[in-house]
Structure formats: C-alpha cells, structure tokens
Amino acid sequence: MVKRIIDHFEESFLSLLMVSMTLLVFAEVVLRFGFNTGIHWAQEVTLLIAAWFVLYGASYGVKVGAHIGVDVFVKLLPSPIHRFLTLLAIVLALVYCGMFLYGSWIYLAKMKMIGIELEDLPVPKWIPMSVLVIGFALLALRFLELGWKVLKGDVEGFHFVDEAKESMEIAEELKEYTEADVAVAEATDTVKEAK
C-alpha cells in the first residue's frame, strides 16, 4: 500500500515536471513570436525544472530499470561473477553519488551563507538548487536498494532496457501487421474480382 503511494507520487511528480516545463516553453514561444513579448523568468525556471526532471528522473530510472546499458559481455559470465561485477558497479556508483552529495552540500551551504538569489526571481538560489542533494540522495538510495536485491539473490544485474530485444519485438509486430495487411488486400482483391 505504502509502496504504491510512493510509486504514484514519484510518477505524478515527474509528470508534473514534464508538463510544467512543456507548458512554460509553449507559453514563452507563443508570447515571443505571437505577441513580441515574453516571460522574463521563463528560461531560468525552465532550466531549473529540467534539472529537477533529470536528477529526480535518474533515480526513478534506476528503480524501474529504464536506463540503457551495455551488458552483453557481463550477461555471458557465470552467475557468481555477474553478481560480483554488479555489486562492484553499485559500490562505484555509490562512491560517485557520495562525492556529488558532499560537493553539492558544500555548494548549497555556501549559496545559503552568501544569500545569492536567482537571476530573474527573488528566490534564494539554494532552494531550487537543492535538487542536487535530493537527486543524488535518491540515486544513492536506489543503488542501495538494488544492491540489497542483488545480495539477497532476487536479481542478478541492473536489468537495463534491452534495446536490441525491443527492436526485434517491434520488427516482429510490424511483420505481423504487414502480413495481415497483405492478407486483407488479397481478400479485398478476391472480393472485387468476384463482383
């Protein structure tokens, strides 16, 4: 129940970010080219929304296995080696997240101490830039969850999106549709000839 609520919140938040960014850019384009005016803060807010979308979306991508990876070689290895390399990759990813968390924490602390505001809005810069800490903390959490699943034996690897497999499935579907269209066309021709 709680997991479903969290999943729904994450998906809704990402959707809200995407819709907000799209509508803001659309409004800016219409105002700029249609009315020769614009929203002076639109570009800055669009960039901030995009940052939130990317950093928040990266952790969600790890959660649902939506990232693209090259793991053909690793899949060929025996299961224990595959699991070991996956755990090693997770540890390296956690080190990466830790370095960015540390650096972004220092950056945000200095932004707050200095009191810098956004260029176009009277908002302290550290508030929207907090996505650095939030995004990398969520990413680290996702890697910890994945590492726990690998240690328990629930999964063997990252479960990346397999583009080649998906492309072959799409090709098969297209082939089936084409064959069905040919069959319909032949049947239509037969009916026309019979008349």
Image: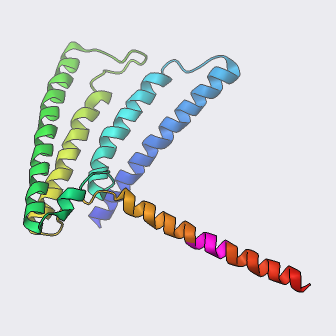
What residue do we see at 40% from left, 46% from top? 14
Q: Position of residue 160 (x, y in %)?
A: 29, 57
Quarter of the C terminus within the rendering: bottom right
Give the quadrant of residue 131. Answer: top left
Q: Nearer the viewer, residue 151 or 72?
A: 72
Residue at coordinates 57% horizontally, 73% vertically from top-left? 176
Q: Dividing the picture into quarters, in which one does residue 138 lie?
A: top left
Give the image location of residue 21, x and y in percent: 48, 36
Name the one closer to the observer, 112 or 150. 150
Question: Please, is residue 23 above or below residue 148 in the view?
Answer: above
For the point 14% across and 53% down, which residue is it? 144
Magenta span of residues: 176-181
Residue most extreme to the right: 195
Residue 44 position, x and y percent, is: 43, 23
Q: Is residue 158 visible?
A: no
Q: Is residue 10 magenta?
A: no
109, above or below 166, in the image: above
Task: Work out whether residue 137 can be spotted.
Answer: yes
The image's colouring method is rainbow
- In terms of image quadrants, where is residue 36? top right
Q: Nearer the viewer, residue 138 or 83?
A: 83
* Left or right, 173 with reference to 86: right
Quadrant assignment for the N terminus: bottom left
Q: Is residue 190 left or right of residue 92?
A: right
User: Secondary structure of the magenta portion, mostly?
Assistant: helix
**Residue 179, percent from left and from top:** 62, 74
Give yes or no for residue 178 being in the magenta stretch: yes
Towards the viewer: 157 or 115: 157
